[in-house]
Image (spheres, coloured by chain):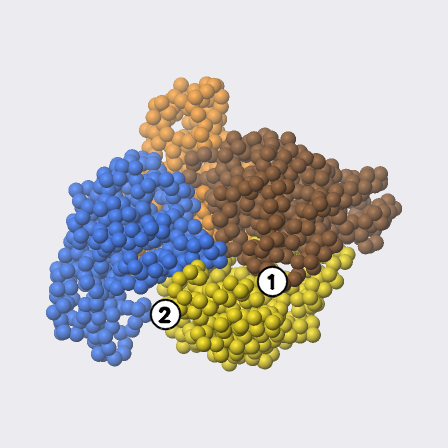
Chain colours: A brown, B yellow, C orange, D blue
Amino acid sequence: MNFGSDNTSGVHPKIMDALVGANTGFATSYGDDLIMDRVRQQIRDLFEAPTAAVYLVTTGSAANSLALATYVDAWDVIYCHQASHISNDECGAPEFYSGGARLMALEGENGKLLPETLRAAVQSTPVGDVHTYQRGALSVTNTSEMGTVYTCEEIAALSSVAKEFDLPFHMDGARFANALAKIGCNPAEMTWKSGVDVLSFGGTKNGLMGVEAVIMFDPDKSWEFELRRKRGGHLLSKHRYLSVQMQAYLTNDHWLDTARMANDRAARLAQGLGKIDGVNIACPTDANMLFISATRAKHRAAMAAGAVYSLAPFGTSLEGDDDEMLNARMVCSWSTTDVEIDQLLAVLST
Amino acid sequence: MNFGSDNTSGVHPKIMDALVGANTGFATSYGDDLIMDRVRQQIRDLFEAPTAAVYLVTTGSAANSLALATYVDAWDVIYCHQASHISNDECGAPEFYSGGARLMALEGENGKLLPETLRAAVQSTPVGDVHTYQRGALSVTNTSEMGTVYTCEEIAALSSVAKEFDLPFHMDGARFANALAKIGCNPAEMTWKSGVDVLSFGGTKNGLMGVEAVIMFDPDKSWEFELRRKRGGHLLSKHRYLSVQMQAYLTNDHWLDTARMANDRAARLAQGLGKIDGVNIACPTDANMLFISATRAKHRAAMAAGAVYSLAPFGTSLEGDDDEMLNARMVCSWSTTDVEIDQLLAVLST
Amino acid sequence: MNFGSDNTSGVHPKIMDALVGANTGFATSYGDDLIMDRVRQQIRDLFEAPTAAVYLVTTGSAANSLALATYVDAWDVIYCHQASHISNDECGAPEFYSGGARLMALEGENGKLLPETLRAAVQSTPVGDVHTYQRGALSVTNTSEMGTVYTCEEIAALSSVAKEFDLPFHMDGARFANALAKIGCNPAEMTWKSGVDVLSFGGTKNGLMGVEAVIMFDPDKSWEFELRRKRGGHLLSKHRYLSVQMQAYLTNDHWLDTARMANDRAARLAQGLGKIDGVNIACPTDANMLFISATRAKHRAAMAAGAVYSLAPFGTSLEGDDDEMLNARMVCSWSTTDVEIDQLLAVLST
Amino acid sequence: MNFGSDNTSGVHPKIMDALVGANTGFATSYGDDLIMDRVRQQIRDLFEAPTAAVYLVTTGSAANSLALATYVDAWDVIYCHQASHISNDECGAPEFYSGGARLMALEGENGKLLPETLRAAVQSTPVGDVHTYQRGALSVTNTSEMGTVYTCEEIAALSSVAKEFDLPFHMDGARFANALAKIGCNPAEMTWKSGVDVLSFGGTKNGLMGVEAVIMFDPDKSWEFELRRKRGGHLLSKHRYLSVQMQAYLTNDHWLDTARMANDRAARLAQGLGKIDGVNIACPTDANMLFISATRAKHRAAMAAGAVYSLAPFGTSLEGDDDEMLNARMVCSWSTTDVEIDQLLAVLST
């Protein structure tokens, strides 16, 4: 019963098979392996972006921070949601890589930014005033940190504001697959056709061992990105083992299959939880994450029975008033089973 | 015939087996996996350092830069050899992580620093002068970038100078296993017993997929290191896949076995090359790297026959005077075969 | 009728006389001038802090940023008010100098932080979570950016929270003199006796040409500060011209006299404005700054008559609806005259 | 007998008069004062550069570091002389401001770089290799740190190499006036007409209180420079006091007059020293600095008699063998008198 995160899951067997399969002979290191050439082509085809620059790194923090640092100056504002991972969960990696850019964390229901909120925030940043931070970039997470998903129209509406003020648009797609599985559009529509300039395209949370792609739809800054990646210590020598994971991930829509599995499990869990008295679902379950509240007694019972998931905020204790409602996050992955879901529902129902 | 680098090799089958073996069920992410607990103990036992702090990252640049940044201030000098990887091959990663520390690249025959060179360099850095860079740390690579190995006595002699001036001592051990296999001492003797404070303990070049450990013999700065690692984007979520590689690496002296294999191959290649007219060996072949010179004609023939290795400096062309002597680096790894060595010797002999 | 800022004023004649007086012969450069020895003693005596470290720089941004960078790590939160100069008006200088520390801008009426707000903010910053920013330092501005003044008791109450969480306490005292003139306590009471660890002690806004002192009540980090100052390009070679200004500033309570003059003028202006229909005073006028609102028509008339002051927010236009109430800031200095005040009151009254 | 540095001198009376003269009424702060408009025009006229961007700061370290940071990336090499101030005497300010650019300190007789040395250094920096530092900018000091002066032809020859490799060309002109006074060309010839892109135009060492101009002959990066200056805490609020110094400095060739005075004094001192047995002049005295060697006994006698100048290296002691030759630097300024020179010559002659 592990619903702690999609990164507590293992590596999908198909991916592990690919790793084993790539483990023969020698390969040029540092990203010049032949498999990477194929991955680059796969991604360009998939995103209908024949000149896109494509790079692989091992963590989402690296993908996001390197991407953002490439698009903003140290004195720029990065507009983002107040629940955003880049603002809350990376120990300041974007600030580190950018040399001190400022993340302006904006409000928005269910983890999603609204265009008017973005516009007001940008307008609150003066133009031509040397004393203040300057207008930098927009960063949006899809699937959002609250498990909700932006539609392509919503992305385009945000982009329209960003373009109005000449802001580059970064998408943190750690769970991009889950968002796409939900919406059903194609990758190009959710990204560059809706105005996204650079995408952190996640694999780790969806069955890879630790691979994220950075896709820059306009390759103008690709050399700068390469230097930043190396300087950050994020250029892997035995790069073929990243490449081959991404290759297998994209082959035969494997990535979408696993995302759909995770979404489906979450939907099933949400459906079950919705029927339990004393459990409230706090957010629409668009993808593979659930945000709920339940009594401390229920949480205590579930965890005593072996369930793993996060109470919020960090540090919330199981000790205390039985009836107090405590917030929790539950995450499903491709490896979540119906059995585990049934077990969790059972223990929370009692 | 791939002698390009030890990182063009694959993952050792035992390591790949371990990865496959670890791929079951869920595991706590971000370094809190149970395997890491065992790895920590293995390393503490191996190094006879029961309180050492141990962390895993995926690249040597990250290991070195995070380690150095933890031990120096932005206005400090890092004393190192002019052939050092940290100075030449990381696109400034140490400078990036430290906020601008200065690498003072010192001379030394065959890639090795001498104590008197270090002392003179430190003494040339004024004390108490606010206008200059300050005395920071010592960083030594063992196996050195020239393929030579420091003995424990040589390490201790350098350390003695470092201690005299209160400099923390970092060892870049990307090929630590090869050095140890050469010297035959135990890991503690080559490190903290000889005055090393922090070690980048390499695995990638010796059969891992991409795992380096940072070992801080005094754990005082461990929390700072953890924050720097996270902020640098180097804390892997599915960390168990790093842990399990390191676990297998250290089990039953596997790491020393593969290092010995690589060293032996290099010795055999050196022996063969030494007998070829028109090929000169430029440096003692202590470990798994050879530095030679040979005529352009020989290099051209070897590469035409499929040999892979690096000409130096970067950008040296195969076009030009046949008889000109060109420098080259050849690297053996655990996966280098006698067949390949024989082939290379054959083509260079003609 | 210049109420734009206290830094549009000139240099007080006594200070200019001191500069002229110091302009004889040679003096050791870079802060080792004899006058600085006397200044150090003056400040130690004034603040009853015999071991305090004292440094001079030319701007408040440098004083604040160097002080904060000395007390926080790059991954730390600096808790401050949302109106704070360090957050809004320094183009990210604190982030630049600290390597990316995060300013958490907190609410508080009339520019002042409340202890319970600080406590809640600190408690919202997890302890021991490597993924988030860490608890860093507290920075409070006295006189605040809204022209209000913290009492010593209020400072002590904030300090009590800071000490509870081991946060260093920085005070931005760009208008420290005005605060002290208002409260009437002694400098020690408003600073270290109330828990302040480091003070940016302003001179520029109170009649100096461009001199701010940084006073560290515990000198432990003084050498680090000196290195940061030099590295930031803020160690002046002809330092005696900073020293002599500070010396004259502190002699015979000159600094308090000029602050009192500025405060008195502001009080007189506030009193007059309070009687004018269509002018509202938005904030208590504790020191030398007034925050008011008035109709656009009144502002237009005043500015047409030559009045200089700032409309807020940046970019507010005089074009538009006559009756709309627009916010403004007016600042008095030692050089503001009764005549100018009467003129401004007259034009705003009509 | 103060020959310690040109920054131990005072402020020239004409400049002090200008400061006093500017001390009336109010002035717009932060560089928007009317005097700055005139200074900008003066500099554009003087340098025949009608669109040049012109900014004032208070230290040479700030001028150099802000200028360099505007023209290089964090992963770039700055090619400079091994005696250069930016490399040796700024505690890493260029590294701090640039985010870690690397200063490559090159050899060159008498403090001057030769074109072939520069070319070799640039060629040693690979192109297109992501693992290494990249080709960044050239920085040359004129008057050099050894007191020698580059001719316009020498500058142009260096620039020709820089242009060949697309390197921006920075000139550290802390003693630009002395260089120009020596050469007799016009400012445009020594700068942009010879290929210089950005000049740190010194005033402090030549009679100002603490003012250096940064002149960017192509204004394309002016806004970036303004943001960097503010973010570095180097935008002075009471900016008119910088402006008015620069205005007086440039009026009626005052700056060249004082530079000529300093050069003439140094020439006279050099002539006298050349006649003394046991004193050797180490470097041509092109401008206002002398580099000599003399016996320890002579230095001891001179300093006992009240002479002030620097022994080199930092920390050289007057205690020891009487006959040992010790290196020294002596600097003349506009305020050096014939009497002091005669006194110094007398005591060194005995």
The residue shown at (28%, 47%) is D195
The residue shown at (44%, 52%) is D74
Name the spot of residue C112 as percent of width and height, x first. Answer: 53, 41
- Horizontal side of residue D236 vs A120, given as left or right: left
- Horizontal side of residue D226 vs B43, given as left or right: left
The residue shown at (62%, 49%) is A39
Q: Nearer the viewer, mark 1 or mark 2?
A: 1
Kind of residue at badge 1: Phe
- Horizontal side of residue D231 vs C131, given as left or right: left
Name the spot of residue D348 as percent of width and height, x first. Answer: 16, 71
Name the spot of residue C282 as percent of width and height, x first. Answer: 50, 30
Residue C242 seen in the figure: no
* Helix, strand or loop under label 1: loop
Instruction: Report the front residue among A173 and C238.
Output: A173
Q: Is A8 located above or below residue A75 in the figure? A: below
Q: CA distance from mark 1 to mark 2?
A: 45 Å
Name the spot of residue C189 as percent of width and height, x first. Answer: 48, 51
Residue A26 is marked as 1
Residue C7 seen in the figure: yes
Q: Is B67 located above or below residue A280 in the figure? A: below
User: Hey, which residue is sitting farthest front in the picture?
Assistant: B350
The residue shown at (69%, 58%) is A21
Q: Residues within 10 Å of mark 2 (few under 14, many from 20)?
A: few
Residue occupied by mark 2: B124
Labels 1 and 2 in the same subunit = no
- Marks 1 and 2 close (CB-CB < 8 Å): no
Q: What is the chain letter for disc 1?
A: A
Q: Is A314 located above or below residue D36 in the figure? A: below
Instruction: Report the front residue among D345 and C150.
Output: D345
Kind of residue at badge 2: Ser
* Helix, strand or loop under label 2: loop
Q: What is the chain letter for disc 2?
A: B
